[in-house]
Structures are given as C-alpha cells and as structure tokens.
Image (cartoon, rainbow, N blue to C red):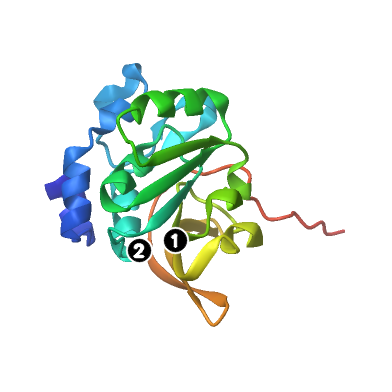
Amino acid sequence: MVASQLRTTAVNDVRVIEAMGAVERERFVPAARRALAYVDTPVPLAGGRALNPPMVVGRLLTEANVVATDKALVVGAATGYAAALLARLAASVVAVEGDAALVAEMRIALADAANVTVVEGPAAAGAADKGPYDLILIDGAVEQIPDALVAQLAPGGRIAAPMIDDGVTRLVIGRVAGGAVSFQRVTDAEAAVLPGFERPRTFSF
C-alpha cells in the first residue's frame, strides 16, 4: 500500500506514511471483506457505507499538514480508520458517526486509542461542544459542507474533504482566514459517499 498507492500519489508526509504503515486497515472492515482491506477502492461496510481508499485519506492528511498539537474532528468516522490515523498524528481526536452499528464497531476498533472520543450523532452537526478544532476531516464525499461544521473551526483551522462537483469528486483543503474559509482543490479521486450532506434539489417545469 505504501509503495504502490501512497508514494505514487503525493502522499509524502513522513508522519502520515508511518501512521498508515502502523495502523492495520483490516481491523476496520468486516471480517468477510478483510481481503479487500488494502485495495485502492472504497470497501463496503454495514448500512450501505464504505471505507475510503487509502490514497484518499492519506492525501487529505498530507495536505492538511497535521501537527502534534492539533485537536481534530472526524466527521462520518464510520468504523474509525481515519480517527485511528489521526490519533497518531494529533493531540486529540473526536470521531462523530450517526450509524449505531458502525459506532459499535468503531468503539471496539479504537479501544486502545486513549486520545479518541467517539460521539454518536448526526455527522453534519459535528460536535460543537467539544470544539473548536484545528482540523476537521470529513471522511466521505459530500455535496456541501454545512456552515455549522465550518463554525467549529478554530482561527487558522483547516477542513479537509472529498467534495462532489457535477458528478466529479475532488479532494479539497479549506483554510480559515479573515473569518472566512477558502478552499483549494488538491486532486480528483474516487471516494465513498457520506450521506446527509446533499444539496437541496431544485425543480424545473
């Protein structure tokens, strides 16, 4: 994975590579799909959800420039793989997930991560009572990022996400400056869709 999927796609932060080499992805996928744990496509989980490809998570963490003092929020944390990586990179992590079955799996998978707090609740709401956050990682492709999440960023904070734009998923990094967030496109990539972040549909007659 490190040689063929990460280093070849600009995942070049030494700390990120070390974390991804140390955290066993098979702990975060169903037993029947553990043979697929390291493939570079979304891995199906319970409830129609999926685990993002390694490159997606690695590239977002690389571009987010995670530092050891960061307080991080993982939105739509699923079974906790991205949260486990951030537990090795940041000071503390809050992992929010709305699917009760995935939350149960995440609690087991992250049982040894003392600096991770698991929160069961709507992903789009985040966890404002535990913020503000230096980094928010949205662990799935979304059509929009709610203002309620952006408001949980600390001054100078960053938000990393796969964004769906006209059917194309692009990895983006947003940074707070002057009270607003400006987003920069990193690259196009296939990512697991995170429900609950759809744009309102318009009707034409």
Give the percent coordinates (x, y) of residue 97. 53, 37
How many badges with numbers are in the image?
A: 2
Most distant residue in the right direction: 205
Quadrant of the image for the C terminus? bottom right
Report the amino acid beneath label 2.
Ala
Label 1: which residue? 170
Check if mark 1's residue and mark 2's residue have beta carbons within 8 Å. Answer: no
Closer to the camera in the image, 98 or 193: 98
- Alpha-carbon distance for marks 1 and 2? 15 Å
Q: Residues within 10 Å of mark 1 (few under 14, many from 20)?
A: many
Name the residue tied to disc 2.
64
Residue drawn at the location 35% of the way across and 27% of the way down: 111
In the image, farthest residue toward the bottom:
178
> Is residue 82 something that shows in the picture?
yes
Choose top left, top right, bottom left or bottom right for residue 123: top right
Q: Residue at x 36, y 59 (%)?
A: 70
Q: Nearer the viewer, mark 1 or mark 2?
A: 2
Q: Position of residue 84 (x, y in %)?
A: 32, 40
Quarter of the view holding residue 28: top left
Disc with the residue nearer the chain's start (1 vs 2): 2
| Vertical comparison of 121 with 56: above or below | above
Confirm whether residue 29 shows in the render.
no
Is 113 situated left or right of 127 in this image?
left
Q: Is residue 52 above or below residue 173?
A: above
Which residue shows up at 51% across the image and 44% down it? Answer: 193
Residue 4 bears which disc, if any? none
Query: The residue under label 1 is which amino acid type?
Result: Arg
